[in-house]
Image (cartoon, rainbow, N blue to C red):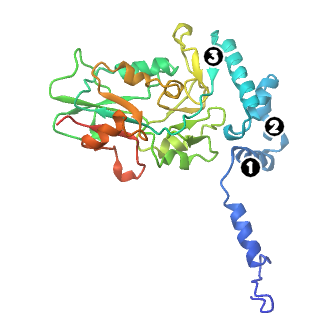
Amino acid sequence: MSDKTTGNTTGTDNFPQENNESVKREMFKPLSRRSFMKAGALGALMIGGTATALLPLRNFKNDTSLENFFQQHYERLTPERMERILKRIEREIKERHGVDANVQDPKPIADVQFAYALNISRCIGCRRCVHACVEENNQSRNPEIQYIRVLEMPAGTFDVEKSDHYYSHETVPAEGKYYMPVQCQQCENPSCVKACPVSATWKDKDGIVVIDYDWCIGCRYCEAACPYWARRFNFAEPNIPKEQINPDMAYLGNRIRKKGTMEKCTFCLGRTRKGLLPKCAEACPAGARQFGNLLDPESVIRHILREKRVYVLKEEMGTRPKFYYWFDT
């Protein structure tokens, strides 16, 4: 019923209209990692009691583990705290893998929007890009995790859903076939970012979609949301021979991940934010891969967009990839 004197609605909830709106805003406010974990802990208390809620704490062996667990979100970290975190990660890598790593946190370069362009006419399907990526980004060797899939398709057709990325030929390119590498498309409107319930993944200022592995809860929602099958989940602890570990690491890039976290291509941000090419582009023997700054009118990327007939993969998804394909004509 209505309170005609005040104009407010009353009833079973007994709240004024304006209070109802504020309650709704609070109820549907996006979850932070902290509030997500808090909600989970409260649920555990209600269901299983205090002992159940505190079970995760049994895994903490020292103060470093506790510091890691209660670490703030990346965007809230001060330079001093980040420096401590980087030193902690270096210690952990030394303890677990016996390698003296140099872990840095390179920031986006001002006035840069990175983009990739790939000439399908030149790709020969050799997969050197795949293996260079694995080596640069400290991806697990057993089980092996690969960020790049090279799709083989019959000439004159285009159906990525029926392509073969498990092909095995003594020589490439195979007769009557062409090849299309697919990796993270670094979307302008990334569906994976929208799907993450704890903001562990986001699009950085230079257009690279990144993941904070310390913040990731392993729910795999981002993996399900990505239409390009570009994300990888660590079902096991990454296995990398000591002599194959790349010691030059980036916090949001190629540092060694842990079991239960997501990972993907980051345009080799530890390299590209220092003015270098991604490792896959450097490794391509056919010159099929081009990389550059969309904001620079003189860049190779802008030249390709002006002069070539380009297209993006699964344009109908509305993700607006910054990974472009073209053919020589």
Q: Quadrant of residue 61?
A: top right
Which residue of the protein is positioned furthest toward the bottom in this rendering?
4
Precedes in sequence: disc 2 or disc 1: 1
Secondary structure at badge 1 equals helix
Secondary structure at badge 3 equals strand
Precedes in sequence: disc 1 or disc 3: 1
**How much space separates mark 1 and mark 3, taking CA atoms?**
36 Å
Return the residue at label 2. Answer: 54
Precedes in sequence: disc 3 or disc 2: 2
Closer to viewer: mark 2 or mark 1: 1
Which label belongs to residue 102?
3
Return the residue at label 1. Answer: 39
**How much space separates mark 2 and mark 1, taking CA atoms?**
13 Å
**Which of these two is toward me, 1 or 135?**
135
Which label belongs to residue 123?
none
Q: Is residue 256 visible?
A: no
Q: Is residue 139 above or below residue 262?
A: above
Query: In the picture provided, is 281 more to the left or to the right than 190?
Result: left
Image spot of residue 242 (x, y percent)? 56, 9
Mark 1 Cα-neighbour bin, 10 Å: few <14, some 14–19, many ≥20: few
Task: Give the residue type at disc 1.
Answer: Ala
Task: Give the residue type at disc 3.
Answer: Asn
Instruction: State yes or no: discs 3 and 2 in contact (Cβ < 8 Å).
Output: no
